[in-house]
Image: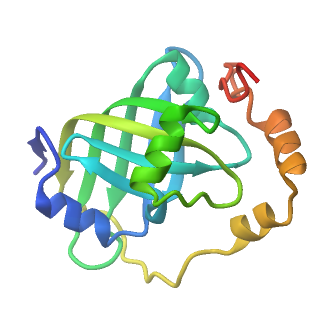
Amino acid sequence: MAKRFPELSDEHRAFLAHQHIFFTATAASTGRVNVSPRPTTALRVLSANAVAYLDRTGSGNETAAHLRQCDRMTLMVCAVEGPPLILRLYGKGAVLRRDTAAYAALLDSAFSGEEPAGARQIVRLDIDLVQTSCGYGVPLFEYKGERPSLDNWSAAKTAEEMEAYQRANNQVSLDGFASGMFEGT
């Protein structure tokens, strides 16, 4: 049975701290719905009603493009080890671009000022609803570790090569919505 909460509790925070993957979901008013996996090593709880994750360069930038169109966002975390549980965080998302003071401040306060290779933005979610459900249908998996592929790919690129890749692949969504990644630059 699903349970609803107005904010993250200590139990929710403990659950998040033991997971390895979460999923983001966004959509504009038209076009495709996007669901993307992210490592929980990039996720930070900022308060009982806010989380953020440090987003790295990927094949697209659907989340940023969607949030410019409509700020609805959901994060979902499923227990794939241990007791079953699904945790969903609903709210309003916002993208903090790398070239902004807000990004620098949050990078410093929540991520110890450490920026991994290929970092492109921080995505913040202001939570208006926390929901848990049983998770009985989620299969069990054994965590073996993080994949080094993204680190290796990012580290092999110069700053100029990374920017060229982002300009070619991260500025427009599948449905043609601008991500705003290089606005003002």
The picture places residue 140, in percent across and down from the top left corner, at 36, 76
Look at 83% across and 51% down and name the residue there.
159
Q: Is residue 8 above or below residue 178?
A: below
Look at 13% across and 47% down and name the residue there.
2
Q: Quadrant of residue 85?
A: bottom left
113 vs 149, nearest the viewer? 113
Q: Is residue 142 visible?
A: yes
The picture places residue 69, in percent across and down from the top left corner, at 53, 16
Q: Is residue 32 visible?
A: no
Q: Quadrant of residue 141?
A: bottom left
The picture places residue 35, in percent across and down from the top left corner, at 51, 43
5 vs 34, nearest the viewer? 5
Q: Is residue 172 left or right of residue 31?
A: right
Q: Is residue 180 above or below residue 149?
A: above
Q: Is residue 47 above or below residue 99?
A: below
Look at 55% across and 25% down and name the residue there.
66
Q: Is residue 95 above or below residue 23?
A: above
Quadrant containing the C terminus in the rendered view: top right
Q: Is residue 128 left or right of residue 148?
A: left
Look at 32% across and 78% down and name the residue there.
81
